[in-house]
Amino acid sequence: MDISRIEPHFIKENQYVGLNFPNQGYVFWKIEAIEEIPYQGYTESPGTIAANTKKDSARLPMSSDSIDNLLEVKECDHLYQVFMGWSPGVIKRWEAYPYESLRRSLDVKMVTVGGDFGDITGFESPKTKPSPMTELWIPTGIDVGFAWENPSTVSCDVEIDMLIRRIDVRVLRDADLIEKILKGNQPCKLKSLGGIEGTFNYKTRTRLDIGTIFLDATRNEIEAAIA
C-alpha cells in the first residue's frame, strides 16, 4: 500500500487529539503508543455487488472468526485511526457513523445510498493508494458501517485494503493543559465524529469517566467536565 497521501494525516506519539461527539462536545487524549495494522484483501462486505445495485450500510464482519465488526474498538484506552481504499474504481462508498446513519448530509437534503452526493469512489481512493478523505477516528462503543453502490452495467467483486492505526491513549484530566488547547496555545488535532450532526448519544461519563467540553468552555466548565 502506498501511504504517501495519508501519511501527512497520521497522529504521532506524544501529540494530542480532541474528538468531537456531535452536539455534546470534545474529549481530549494524549497519544501514548501507536501500532499500525495493514489489512489487505478484505472481501466479505459488501462482497459481490450486482450491476446497478445499492447495498445499505453495514459493519465489516469476519464470519470465519465470528467477528461482527472488524473495526470495533474494545478497550476504552484505545482509538483507531483508519484509512481505506477499494477496487474496482467505479464502486461508490458512503460512510455510516454510527452504522445506522449516513454522513455528509446537507441542511436541506439527507444523504441516501445512490444519491447525488456524500460518496467516495474507488477511483478517488484506490486500494493501492487510499485517500485522506477516508480518514476515520473510532473510540470504543461506536460501530461504524459503510453503504455501497455499483452503478456499472456489470457485477463487481469489491476488495478493500485498510490501514488500521491502533492507538494507545490517555484521557486528559489536566485543566491547565486543556485550557491551553482551547486557547490555541497547545497544538492538538481536532476531529468531529459522525459529522456535525449525529443521532447517537455517547455516554462519555460511563465509558471514559469524563465529561465533554465545548471549544468555548470556561475554566469552571472544564473543571466540572474532568471532575
Image (cartoon, rainbow, N blue to C red):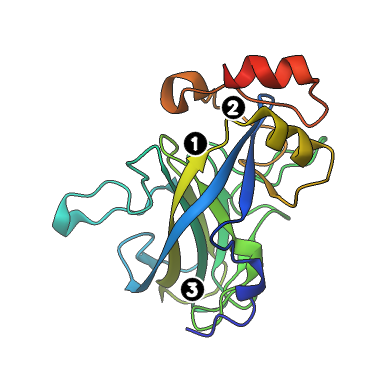
Q: CA distance from mark 3 to mark 1?
A: 22 Å
Judge left or right: residue 161 versus residue 217. left
Q: Which residue is mark 2?
A: 199
Residue 148 or 219: which is nearer the viewer? 219
How far across and how far down the image is residue 157, in percent? 38, 74
Q: Secondary structure at mark 2?
A: loop
Residue 197 in which image quadrant: top right
Q: Secondary structure at mark 1?
A: loop
How many other residues sit within 10 Å of disc 2, few (<14), some (14-19) or many (≥20)? few
Q: Are marks 3 and 2 in contact (CB under 8 Å)?
A: no
In the image, what residue occupies the spot 54% across and 70% down?
Answer: 91
Amino acid on which the number 2 mark rests in the picture: Thr
In the image, what residue occupies the spot 56% across and 60% down?
Answer: 93
Residue 83 or 19: which is nearer the viewer? 19
- Residue 73 numbered mark, or none: none
Nearer-N-terminus badge (1/2): 1
In the image, what residue occupies the spot 59% across and 66% down?
Answer: 10
Amino acid on which the number 3 mark rests in the picture: Trp
How far across and how far down the image is residue 101, in percent? 56, 37
Nearer-N-terminus badge (3/1): 3
The image quadrant where one finds the C terminus is top right
- Residue 100 numbered mark, or none: 1
How far across and how far down the image is residue 128, in percent? 50, 83
Residue 181 or 132: which is nearer the viewer? 181
